[in-house]
Image: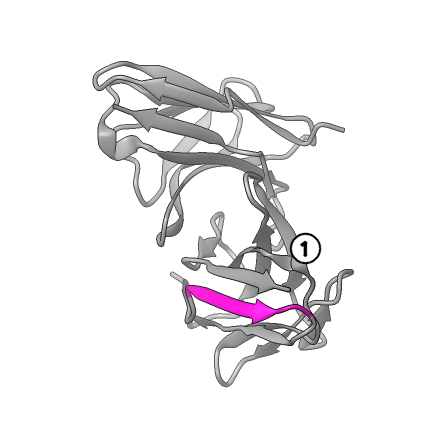
């Protein structure tokens, strides 16, 4: 079974500053990795995913994540955040024969002007 | 295109009362899931279903029952509500492909007094 650790529960950041959210997973098999975002009072939405191929994946709103197999990490980054990026971010992992996704505890990003 | 719809959005119960949460999806997805979200604990899987007429237990199934009589609907029941079941409940669905992402509803906020 897979598990996910998000190393930061809260990340305050100023507008236009960079942000990095850390995610480590444990698995003995190949994995599929996901980042979801949850805006206040809403459900989770897929931000980006790594399935195979290029280890760097990007979202349409400027986020990117890099799959690092040797470090079993999938950190999320954005070079310049906006107020609208204030949300909770969840890292998730599943395996090749998994019905289920395992989620991390979440990281709350608060962007201040 | 409604996606995943959860009803009700809010509910207050007294200890010992029962209720059913309804999840409906219009994407013809095979797999459906019920999660609960509590502060600092991320999403925890309650029950899931890999097809019409099938259900399975997740991480925290005690005190809950589910049914999937129709492919598009997944019901979560609380037979005798307890204060520990105060939470936000999310339904999600996805295709039968192991690397497909989850699609979430907007949640049901349940308070048990």
Q: Secondary structure at mark 1?
A: helix
Which sits in the foreground, B11 or B50?
B11
Q: Which of the colour schemes (rainbow, by chain, secondary structure, one colour) is used?
A: one colour
Residue A109 in picture, x, y percent from top left: 54, 62
- State whether residue A48 appears in this view: yes
Residue B98 in picture, x, y percent from top left: 58, 52
Residue A57 in picture, x, y percent from top left: 70, 70
Residue identifier under label 1:
A84
Q: A38 left or right of B36?
A: right
- State whether residue B49 appears in this view: no
Verify whether residue A10 appears in magenta. Answer: yes
Verify whether residue B51 appears in magenta. Answer: no
Q: Which segment is the magenta one?
A: A9-15
- Location of residue A48 with respect to A38 vertically, above or below: below
Q: B100 left or right of B108?
A: right
Q: Residue furthest bottom?
A: A70
Q: Quadrant of the N terminus of chain B?
A: top right
- Location of residue B5 with respect to A82 vertically, above or below: above
Q: B105 left or right of B83?
A: right
Please name the residue shown 56% across and 19% down the image: B70
Q: Residues within 10 Å of mark 1 (few under 14, many from 20)?
A: few
Residue B105 in picture, x, y percent from top left: 58, 34
Please name the residue shown 26% across and 17% down the image: B14
- Location of residue B82 with respect to A42 vertically, above or below: above
Which sits in the foreground, A22 or A88?
A88
Please name the residue shown 39% across and 25% down the image: B66
Q: Residue furthest front?
A: A113
């Amino acid at each position: 079974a897979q598990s996910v650790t998000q190393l930061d529960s809260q990340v305050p950041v100023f507008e236009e500053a960079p942000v990095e959210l850390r995610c480590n997973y444990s698995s003995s098999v190949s994995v599929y990795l996901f980042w979801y975002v949850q805006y206040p009072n809403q459900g989770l939405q897929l931000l980006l995913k790594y399935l195979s191929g290029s280890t760097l994946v990007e979202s349409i709103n400027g986020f990117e994540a890099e799959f690092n197999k040797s470090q079993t990490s999938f950190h999320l980054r954005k070079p310049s955040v906006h107020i609208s990026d204030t949300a909770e971010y969840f890292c998730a992992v599943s395996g090749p024969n998994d019905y289920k996704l395992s989620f991390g505890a979440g990281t709350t990003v608060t962007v201040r002007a | 295109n409604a996606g995943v719809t959860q009803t009700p959005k809010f509910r207050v119960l007294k200890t010992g009362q029962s209720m059913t949460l309804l999840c409906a999806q219009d994407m013809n997805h095979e797999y459906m899931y019920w999660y609960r979200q509590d502060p600092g604990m991320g999403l925890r899987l309650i029950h899931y279903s890999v097809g019409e007429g099938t259900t399975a237990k997740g991480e925290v199934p005690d005190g809950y029952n589910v049914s999937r009589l129709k492919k598009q609907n997944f019901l979560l029941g609380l037979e005798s509500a307890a204060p520990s079941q105060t939470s936000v409940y999310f339904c999600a669905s996805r295709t039968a492909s192991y690397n497909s992402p989850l699609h979430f509803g907007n949640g049901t906020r349940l308070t048990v007094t």
